[in-house]
Amino acid sequence: MSEQSTRILVFSHRPEVRESIITAVGRRPATDLGQVDYVEAAGVADVLAEMDEGAVDLAILDGEAQPTGGIGLCRQVKNEIDDCPPIVIAVRRKDDRWLATWSQADAVLVHPLDPLTAAETVADVLRARRVPVVRG
C-alpha cells in the first residue's frame, strides 16, 4: 500500500463544481494509492502556473468552465507541456465525450458524478501513469 501523497489539480470557475469533483473522487480513490492533496484553480492562469511548475500528478478540468473551458485547455497543455500529467475532463453531457477525446484527455467523467466511477477512473489513470513505458 502506497503512502506517497498524490497532488490533483481541480479546475473550474465555479467553486461548487470543484467541490463536487473533490467530494466524488475523495481523499483516497483506491487503497493502493496514497492520500490525495487537492489544489483548486479558478482561472486558466492558475492552471498553467501549477502545470508549468511540474508538481501536479493529475488534473481534473471542468469542460464547462468559463470563459475558457477545460476541453480547450486540455488540448493546449497536452501540446505545450513536455511530460504533461494525465488529465481527466468532467463534462455535463455524455454526447460531449468525443470533444474530451479530441482534447487528448486521458479519461472523461460525466456529471452528475458518481463517486464510485469518479474514484475508479482517477485511480485507473494514476495507475497507468506509474507503469513504465517500454520502447523498442
Image (tube, grey):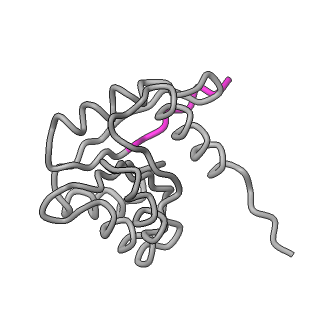
The residue closer to the viewer here, 100 or 135, is 100
Total number of numbered discs in the rendering: 0
**Residue 3 to residue 12: above or below:** above
Residue 64 in percent (x, y) is at 23, 55
Overall secondary structure of the magenta section? loop
Q: Which residues are magenta?
A: 1-8
- Decide which of 53, 62 is in the foreground and name it: 62
Could you tell me which residue is drawn at 33 percent across and 64 percent down?
71
Which quadrant does the C terminus fall into?
A: bottom right
131 sits to left or right of 104: right
Q: Quadrant of the N terminus?
A: top right
Q: Residue at x 81, y 65 (%)?
A: 134
Q: Is 67 a magenta residue?
A: no
Hey, which residue is sitting farthest front in the picture?
95
Question: Could you tell me residue 40's position as x and y percent?
Answer: 25, 42
- Residue 6 is inside the magenta segment: yes
80 to the left or right of 136: left
Which residue is at a point 42% across and 62% down the rendered structure image? 100
- Give the farthest residue toward the right: 136
Q: In this rendering, is residue 29 above or below 89?
A: above
